[in-house]
Image (cartoon, grey):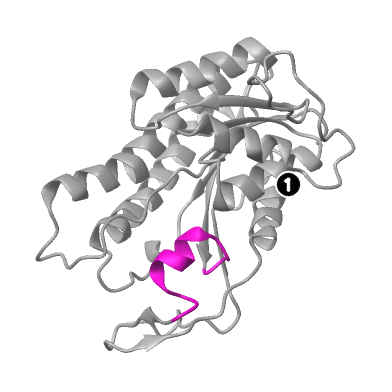
Amino acid sequence: MSGRIAVVTGAGSGIGRAVARTMLEAGYRVALAGRRESALTETAGGMLGAPERGALRPDAPEGGAIHPNALVVPTDVTVEAEVDALFDRVVQEWGRVDVLFNNAGAFGPAVSAADIELADWEQTLAVNLTGALLSARGAMRVMRAQSPQGGRIINNGSISAQAPRPLSVAYAVSKHALTGLTKSVDLDGRPFRISCGQIDIGNTRTEIMDELGVGSGALQADGSRRVEPTFDVEAAARTVLLMADLPAEANIGALTITASGMPFGGRG
């Protein structure tokens, strides 16, 4: 897969950071998108053990040594013009897009559906759903027009796309809707050799797990709190790479990976 071109949104932290680094290590050229340029530069420059670490691209931010196959593109996925500019920049730099890891997301407020504020609801859906649509749209337009035609989009869902946590209405609804987006993109992309799949990840060790209190006691459906098991984010990243590396004739439409023993199967 050496030299293939990927775009990773939400690449400044968590799963996005791990996936971007894993793809760089596998030989991909990777455009890192996210709101914070400093975090993206840290992702692109912090690959321990990579022989290219510390190489300086001519367009790297001042003082920022980044991987030579990384392209840092600050992007707010809720802003249409910025998403369009992201894909324009990648095409200008590398000529095509082979893979999009559609990852940018936000958990939103921990509040009951009876109490959520409209502004909080709209902001969560803007990032998790509208941002995912804009990113998929941008990738599809490039993949449809390029030669050879086609590509792959991998949406980062969540096990909340299957069963919600308590007090997570905005997040859960956005992730359920993302499943519909995944299926629609895969269907609409068929004539252009564009495939789309979704990975639903549960309890990988990232910052959001601290917000949910997974390590200290996450709220359960019965009102109790329980310390939940987690797993290394690198395992999730390798799974995304597995999906990305499939030949064009194959696609994983839906894949679930969770921490062993987490309270998911019986949730609710």
What residue is rendered at 78% in x and 22% in y? 56
Which residue is most to the front? 63
Q: Is residue 146 above or below residue 130?
A: above
* Quadrant the C terminus occupies: bottom left
Which residue is most to the top? 92
Q: Which is nearer the eye, 64 or 219?
A: 64
Which residue is most to the left? 114
Q: Which residue is mark 1?
A: 22
What's the magenta region?
203-216
Q: Position of residue 171 (x, y in %)?
A: 31, 57
What residue is rendered at 56% in x and 15% in y? 89
What residue is rendered at 47% in x and 66% in y? 209
Tell me the kind of residue under disc 1.
Thr
Number of on-image labels: 1
Is 255 on the left-hand or right-hand side of 180?
Answer: right
Q: Is residue 52 in view from this perspective?
A: yes
Q: Position of residue 105 (x, y in %)?
A: 41, 47
Q: Position of residue 94 (x, y in %)?
A: 69, 16
Q: Is residue 152 in view from this perspective?
A: no
